[in-house]
Image: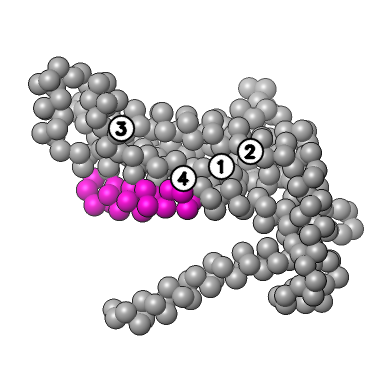
């Protein structure tokens, strides 16, 4: 494929991504009447009231705190558990290793939506409704198969000669994992981390299922406070969604290189 078709495809894909984002951001500067009459036009006058109303509301910052707690705890647990499991599946030989690994990867075939009813019953029996742990633990469980899959492929690409040299120098299995393997696997760890950071930050279904108290709402649930029985404040919703997207976009740009490197490295050998 020549350069011109590549540029054309890149521009088309970029526009498909950017147009909804720009439209949403500009919609936050409009009134509800202007959104209904001219949703895709530029604002006649940039109104900051929608953004200032959200930024000065205490519940917005409380929802950011709740989302941050859920996100950090989810990513920390995923990286800890998945890196240990991936190390075992990649570097240690034992009977049934491939069978157990294939069993783990089956989890990628079952999204959260399939298990909503049994998950809700389990959380209710465990008294985890209206509890942030009721979001953190299922997110970890449903994200582990993909995380283990990515990390295992990267760990298997580390040369065995490096591990042998570490053992000769007196480094044990855990020492090799902690001091050598993890530092070399920063691209893969960043990949898993960013994917789950963004996924946790934008998760709507699980908080909707678990949380009833407004004090525990995460950012995606905060949109509901601008929806009424007979109408919705669409301008405020646009502003709220725009402000909610900013942290996720920042997370991605900060780890963009590591994300691409981790995905490609894990896909080459495994």
Give the dominant element type of the magenta stretch: helix, strand or loop.
helix
- Say whether disc 3 or disc 4 marks the residue closer to the N-terminus: 3
Quadrant of the rendered image containing residue 211: top right
Residues at marks 4 and 2 touching, judged by CB atoms closer than 8 Å: no
Q: Which residue is mark 2?
A: 67
Quadrant of the rendered image containing residue 92: top left
- Say whether disc 4 or disc 1 marks the residue closer to the N-terminus: 4
Q: What colour scheme was applied to this rendering of the protein?
A: one colour
Q: Which residue is mark 4?
A: 194
Residue 206 can be seen, yes or no: yes
Residue 95 can be seen, yes or no: no
* Left or right: 105 as drawn, with respect to 220: left
- Say whether disc 2 or disc 3 marks the residue closer to the N-terminus: 2
- Say whether disc 4 or disc 2 marks the residue closer to the N-terminus: 2
The number of numbered discs placed on residues in the rendered structure image is 4
Q: Nearer the viewer, mark 4 or mark 1?
A: 4
């Amino acid at each position: 494929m020549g350069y011109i078709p590549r540029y054309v495809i890149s521009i088309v894909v970029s526009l498909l991504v950017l147009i909804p984002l720009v439209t949403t951001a500009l919609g936050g500067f409009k009134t509800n009447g202007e959104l209904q009459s001219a949703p895709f036009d530029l604002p006649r006058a940039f109104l900051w009231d929608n953004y200032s109303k959200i930024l000065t509301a205490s519940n917005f910052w409380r929802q950011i705190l709740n989302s941050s707690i859920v996100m950090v705890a989810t990513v920390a647990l995923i990286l800890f558990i998945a890196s240990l499991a991936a190390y075992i599946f990649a570097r240690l030989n034992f009977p049934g290793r491939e069978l157990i690994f294939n069993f783990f990867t089956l989890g990628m075939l079952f999204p959260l939506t399939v298990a909503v009813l049994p998950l809700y019953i389990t959380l209710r029996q465990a008294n985890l409704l209206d509890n942030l742990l009721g979001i953190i633990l299922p997110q970890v469980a449903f994200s582990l198969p993909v995380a283990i899959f990515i990390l295992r492929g990267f760990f298997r690409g580390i040369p065995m000669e490096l591990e042998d040299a570490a053992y000769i120098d007196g480094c044990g299995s855990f020492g090799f994992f902690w001091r050598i393997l993890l530092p070399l696997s920063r691209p893969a760890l960043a990949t898993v981390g960013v994917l789950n950071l963004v996924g946790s930050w934008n998760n709507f279904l699980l908080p909707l299922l678990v949380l009833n108290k407004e004090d525990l709402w995460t950012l995606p649930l905060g949109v509901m406070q601008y929806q009424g029985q007979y109408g919705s404040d669409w301008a405020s919703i646009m502003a709220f969604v725009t402000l909610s997207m900013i942290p996720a976009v920042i997370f991605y740009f900060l780890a963009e290189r590591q994300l691409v490197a981790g995905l490609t490295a894990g896909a080459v050998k495994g």
